Amino acid sequence: MYFNGTNFDTYLKDYPDEKGYFGRYGGVYVSPELTAAMAEIADAYYTICKSRKFIAELRRIRKEFQGRPTPISHLERLSASLGNVQLYAKREDLNHTGAHKLNHCMGEALLAKYMGKKKVIAETGAGQHGVAMATAAAYFGLQCDVYMGQVDIEKQAPNVARMQILGANVIPVTEGLATLKEAVDAAFAAYAADYTNSIYCIGSVVGPHPFPLMVRDFQAVVGIEAREQFVEMTGELPDAVVACVGGGSNSMGMFAGFLNDPVKIYGIEPLGRGPALGDHAASLQYGTEGVMHGFNSIMLKGADGGPAPVYSVASGLDYPSSGPEHAFLRDLGRVKYDVVGDEETIDAFFTLSRMEGIIPAIESAHAVAYAMKLAKEMGRGSVLINLSGRGDKDMDYVISHYGIR
Ligand SMILES: *Cc1c(COP(=O)(O)O)cnc(C)c1O
């Protein structure tokens, strides 16, 4: 299928190019030392991860350890309450550890094993990526160092405990604002100092090449499964697919399955409290082109030109940029990016819980809220939501800040 001059029959093989670019976005913007390390990971990815042995092992792990394939659920009561459009959810909340993140962490850790690395290094904000990484490291018997801002450590005690129970070292970062940005910087620095023994495992489709490629391909299992399951369930493709976008991994995985189909695709960013800088994390909506964390994309910039402070009720969406492939798909017009704020998200969180018996992650509730609006607009047809994770981690926060609705 051609879309605005781009051939989507071969899209997933054509992009990124060998330098890691999706059009003008992506690339490798790191020190010369780390550039060499990235090239080593890229070489390993193109050879090892395309081998029959690696693919077979990853398939077995997905089935026997992660519990894949995750099902699609028809949201019957919710659909009926909105009109004639049928809503469906791809249940990544039922993936082991309760979210999609383990999909790429198992792939990255398996690659580490094949490369003979002893240690995985990761950053984490709210702790979700750290927990998924610690889980993968435990499975493969790898050492795991997770860099986490001191402020986040204090806010996310249960995830810190999980990582420690799983045997990871949680290393506090006290520089600057002591949150995600500083944790990324510290993790990169630790990796630069020890890249022969270790491998850096990023938490989304962000960072220097080959990470946006690797994470997309490991997450593509979500979209590939979903497409097949949806056709089997209904005999046709969905009319629309919706996913939330922070860094952009759950959405990119889902979209990868449908880019070459006549399906409308929506990526939903967090509008938080509103459109003023500092109140949201909707980088593709309000950002401009720039380089951070080793890649060129669309980002929200502060007064100094560096990453701006961002906010969302969903800590997993709280990132001042998005993966370069999202910027590219936005410019192509293949994916429509839109926003949903905190209030609508919290409403959707309760609505899905009450009507379907599924408590969604607040991140995923952004996609649910948008799909509900879309269903009313469309009048008829079907919408597939990527339910990226479960909301157990968010219950205390929601109850204390919003009460029971
Ligand atoms: C981390 C997280 C996200 C956001 O990350 P992406 O890379 O944008 O997918 C979304 N949903 C859940 C449940 C998460 O844990």
Image (tube, helix red, strand yellow):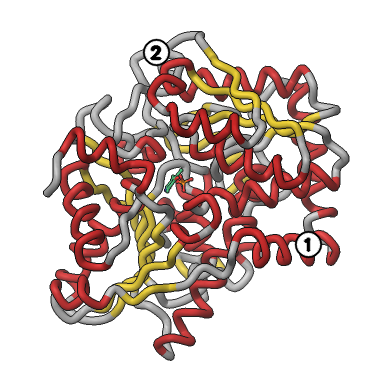
The answer to whether residue 97 is above or below residue 197 is: below
- Badge 1 is on which residue? 57
Please give left or right for residue 126 compared with residue 205 in the image: left
Q: To which quarter of the image does residue 4 belong?
A: bottom left
Callout 1 environment at 10 Å: few (<14), some (14 to 19), or many (20+)? Answer: few
- As helix, strand or loop, the secondary structure at mark 1 comes to helix
For the residues carrying marks 1 and 2, which lies nearer the camera in this image? 1
- As helix, strand or loop, the secondary structure at mark 2 comes to loop
Amino acid type of the residue tagged 1 in the rendering: Glu
Q: Name the residue at 21% across, 41% down.
A: 342
Please indicate, yes or no, whether residue 317 appears anywhere in the rendered image: yes
The foreground one among 31 and 353 is: 353
The answer to whether residue 322 is above or below residue 84 is: above
**What numbered label is drawn on residue 304?**
2
Please give left or right for residue 129 compared with residue 370 in the image: right
Please give left or right for residue 344 compared with residue 261 in the image: left
The answer to whether residue 279 is above or below residue 95 is: above
Amino acid type of the residue tagged 2 in the rendering: Asp
Q: Name the residue at 46% across, 9% down.
A: 176
Residues at marks 1 and 2 touching, judged by CB atoms closer than 8 Å: no
Whether disc 1's CB lies below 8 Å from ligand 1 is answered: no
Q: Where is residue 369 in the image (x, y as percent from the top left)?
A: 23, 56
Please indicate, yes or no, whether residue 328 appears anywhere in the rendered image: no
Q: Where is residue 386 in the image (x, y as percent from the top left)?
A: 41, 61
Callout 2 environment at 10 Å: few (<14), some (14 to 19), or many (20+)? Answer: few
The foreground one among 81 and 288 is: 81
> Separation of disc 1 and disc 2 at Cα?
46 Å
